[in-house]
Image (cartoon, helix red, strand yellow):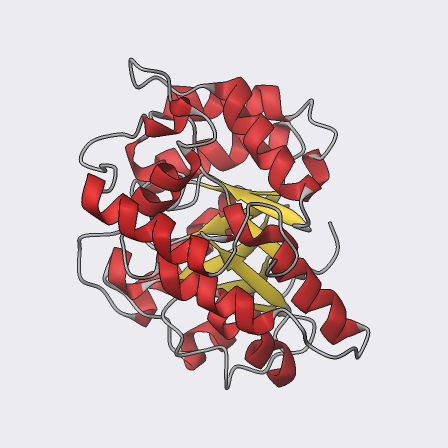
């Protein structure tokens, strides 16, 4: 994988009724998202409930994923707080030729830039052939990257720190580093981000907006008129009214009931909220895989 750019989904994880990870359907879902327009997929991101999935299940999935026809299009997340477990998962991934990672700082504890630099330094010292996209999401981990911290990490590890997913939205407008990927975490920031020099997006809702997002991206690259960005932003805003994981699984469960299975404490939308979500999407004439309003 060269410079990470384009449309990426934080792929959903699919579970059986007993809440074990359904490896085949999780991979199939990710591959379908790529078929619908995504340049690639981040597996084991927050949307994939990675913090709730066992390490052994992650390893089993990676072994199977290594046989995918799209194996070069995957970023591997960790969803782990433990430094040693993160290193072990990265080493196993690397042994399967997955060397591109999306890594968030550990959650729960309070820390600053110096501590975060030490965390990533130890990851890179242990797995020097890695390519890491930093994951900036203060809402989930309690830490927000500063521009200065990112710049220090890139200077220290120019071959390993290759990008940032910005879901706190404090970086994408002003962070400028040569040959470095800046990828906002929402379709609402896609077009503006591209205009500012960003590389694309990595988002939860690209699980359902892949074709729309890809159209906006391609039209920008080809300098064509933007005809679907308004629609794309309305769809994202509709999902933003609800918990994204709950909304995505509730929406997809109408296509396949297996999407109803989520790991506690994650839950599906209430009947009322699901009805509202579907009604609002229907008002937009949004269909999964659609390129524009009907």
Q: Residue furthest right?
A: 222
**Residue 125 appears at what percent x and percent y?**
51, 49
Q: Is residue 277 above or below residue 145?
A: above
The residue nearer to you, when weighing 6 against 36, is: 36
- Report the side of 139 relative to 203 (left or right): left
Q: Residue at 43% x, 45% y: name it.
A: 45
Residue 150's place in the image compared with 81, above or below, is: below
Give the image quarter of residue 263. Answer: top left
Near-viewer residue (97 or 11): 11
| Foreground pick, 219 / 185 | 219
Q: Residue 163: image x %, image y %? A: 57, 64
129 versus 219 height, above or below: above
Residue at 71% over, 39% down:
72
Q: Is residue 153 left or right of residue 268?
A: right
Q: Residue at x 17, y 55 (%)?
A: 109
Vertically, is 66 above or below 152? above
Q: In the rendering, at what x and y percent does residue 113 appear?
A: 33, 71
Q: Name which residue lies at 44% across and 53% down.
A: 282
- Identify the image quadrant of residue 83: top left
Residue 136 horizontal/vertical position (percent): 39, 64
């Amino acid at each position: 994988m060269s410079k990470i750019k384009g449309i990426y989904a934080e792929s959903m994880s699919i579970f059986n009724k007993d809440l074990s990870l359904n490896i085949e359907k999780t991979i199939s879902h990710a591959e379908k998202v790529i078929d619908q327009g995504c340049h690639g997929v981040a597996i084991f991101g927050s949307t994939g409930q990675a913090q709730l999935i066992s390490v052994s299940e992650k390893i089993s999935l990676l072994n199977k994923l290594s046989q995918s026809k799209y194996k070069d299009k995957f970023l591997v997340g960790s969803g782990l707080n433990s430094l040693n477990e993160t290193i072990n998962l990265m080493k196993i991934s690397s042994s399967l030729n997955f060397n591109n990672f999306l890594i968030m700082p550990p959650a729960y504890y309070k820390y600053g830039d110096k501590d975060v630099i030490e965390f990533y330094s130890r990851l890179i010292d242990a797995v020097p052939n890695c390519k890491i996209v930093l994951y900036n999401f203060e809402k989930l981990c309690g830490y927000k990257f500063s521009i200065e911290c990112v710049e220090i990490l890139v200077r220290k590890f120019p071959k390993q720190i290759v990008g940032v997913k910005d879901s706190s939205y404090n970086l994408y407008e002003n962070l400028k580093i040569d040959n470095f990927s800046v990828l906002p975490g929402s379709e609402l920031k896609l077009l503006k981000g591209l205009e500012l020099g960003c590389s694309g997006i990595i988002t939860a809702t690209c699980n359902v907006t892949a074709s729309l997002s890809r159209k906006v991206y391609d039209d920008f690259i080809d300098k064509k008129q933007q005809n679907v960005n308004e629609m794309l932003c309305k769809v994202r805003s509709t999902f933003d009214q609800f918990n994204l994981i709950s909304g995505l699984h509730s929406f997809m469960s109408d296509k396949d009931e297996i999407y109803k299975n989520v790991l506690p404490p994650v839950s599906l939308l209430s009947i009322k909220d699901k009805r509202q979500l579907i009604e609002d999407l229907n008002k937009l004439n949004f269909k999964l895989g659609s390129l524009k309003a009907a």
